Amino acid sequence: MANTKQILAINRFDARHAKGLDAGLQSLIARREATFGASSVLVYQRPIRMVRAEGVWMFDADGRRYLDVYNNVASIGHCHPRVVEAIAKQAATLNTNTRYLYDNIHDYAERLLKTFTSGLSNIVFTCTGSESNDFALRLTKSFTGGTGFIVTETAYHGNTEAVTEVSPSSYKTRTVPPHVRTVPPPDAYRHPTNDVGARFAEDVAKAISDLARNGVKFGGLLLDSIFSSDGIYADPPGFLREAVDVVHEAGGLFISDEVQPGFGRTGAAMWGFERHGVEPDIVTMGKPMGDGFPIGGVVTRPEILESFCETTGYFNTFGGNPVAAAAGLAVLDVIEDEGLIENASRIGGYMRAGLQEIAGRHPSIGDVRGAGLFIGIEFSLPGTTDPDPATTGHVINELKERGVLISAAGAYGNVLKVRPPLCFSRDNADLFLETLDAVLSQR
Ligand SMILES: Cc1ncc(COP(=O)(O)O)c(C=O)c1O
């Protein structure tokens, strides 16, 4: 089997390829490396110098247009005019912190909380998904008294110290810390005959027992409800139910990380966990929440938040500021007014059908799966389920040369992550399908 890959290593630019690039690109890359140092990560063998974006399109410095099939930050479309206007207007009026009263953050909080069941009635605003997950870990520890967490093998939940410990896809040389256990993702492709939900619940139960055997009290199960970094696992709907029951029976909390599937992407509902008919104890959100404006949030039950606030203060200078609230409200308006959840369902279904047809002609595609506009295309060595990251890397770079932006996920970096803005049209879908077909036909 191919070696496992860190998420950031997938399709990463390698400086050894810099020689063939034009002088302008070489100079920008050199400036970047001189200032960003070892943390610099660029994508594509030939990096792109982006200058502007609009809807589903991005434009480089040479005026070349790219179809964005990858972006869940600009989830309702790049530079959406209603979001841009809301941000600009509010920034010109008032921008301060939540220690003052102002109306729009409460309009926003109430409107967002209406999308949850009544128990999940408190929200804490942050600026990023990482901060949201960091806070969720702290809430869980204080409410349960447990410090043990369970995550999937290739999970990514963010970049703080505590969150990196529960993000195995970020480990380079470090190993899983003593308070963390990993479980395999609910993979119906490699285990088609298993009951996916029962197997997943069994793995979670084993991990809880193992923590206990090693003297670690269980705190919670933290999952991205579409398993994006693990390789996108969506079906069958409902497969999370048994595992969530196991967690609750053991006195733990279920944290649903909605940074990727949230805000309608799965085409079924506002939140990814809803497809599985489960009620999380804590929900974390970020990326698509402000269509590019940095805003995040943690939704939970009042008693969970109270247990934390009894012992510790929490203040977030930028979280929930009036400009963030204006961006968040505009995003909710657009999702509703443009029918984006229905569009994700309709165009997502159309794309999956088109991809199945292409897979029938190209044996390198082992599986097509997903929900709404979050689709995984898994490349396997023909006739096997062994991962084929080489073909995946080739396809990503060839698509880019033909004006289509996409990247990959999964433990081996062999699953194309199809995650376009939710305003993707049928014409956009056709262009993507035709270009992918052409790339595979030339391989
Ligand atoms: C599932 C998931 N959770 C959390 C995060 C962290 O979000 P941020 O980069 O905004 O801190 C990410 C980012 O990729 C993510 O994919």
Image (tube, rainbow, N blue to C red):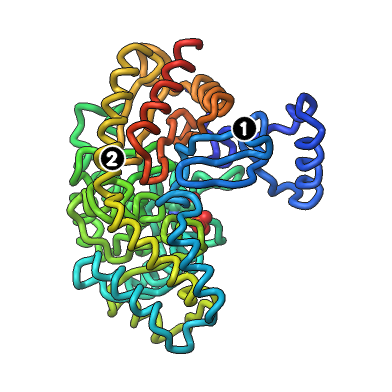
- Which residue bears the numbered disc 1? 44
* Cβ at disc 2 under 8 Å from ligand 1: no
Q: Amino acid at mark 1?
A: Tyr
**Relative to 137, does residue 150 appear above or below in the rendering?**
above
Q: Could you give the CA–CA distance between mark 1 and mark 2, rounded to whole angstroms?
A: 27 Å
The residue closer to the viewer here, 269 or 138, is 269
Where is residue 278 drawn, in percent x and y?
Answer: 20, 56
Q: Position of residue 7 (x, y in %)?
A: 53, 40
* Secondary structure state at the residue bearing disc 2: strand
Q: Is residue 78 visible?
A: yes
Which x, y percent locates residue 161? Answer: 56, 61
The residue carrying pointer 2 sits among few (fewer than 14), some (14 to 19) or many (20 or more) residues within 10 Å by Cα, namely: many
The one of 1 and 215 positioned closer to us in this rendering:
1
**Along the polypeptide, which appears first: circle 1 or circle 2?**
1
Residue at left 53%, top 68%? Answer: 88
**The residue at label 1 has a CB less than 8 Å from ligand 1:** no
Residue furthest to the bottom in view is 100
Q: Amino acid at mark 2?
A: Ala
Asked if residue 396 is positioned above or below residue 268 in the image, the reply reads above
* Depth order, front residue of 441/92: 92
Q: Is residue 175 left or right of residue 259?
A: right
Can you identify the residue that label 2 sits on?
371
How packed is label 1: few (under 14 Cα within 10 Å), some, or many (20 or more)? some
Residue at horizontal 48%, vertical 31%? 412
Q: Residue at x 50, y 80 (%)?
A: 315
| Res 221 quadrant in image | bottom left
**In the drawing, what numbered circle is on residue 332?**
none
Q: Position of residue 297 (x, y in %)?
A: 41, 67
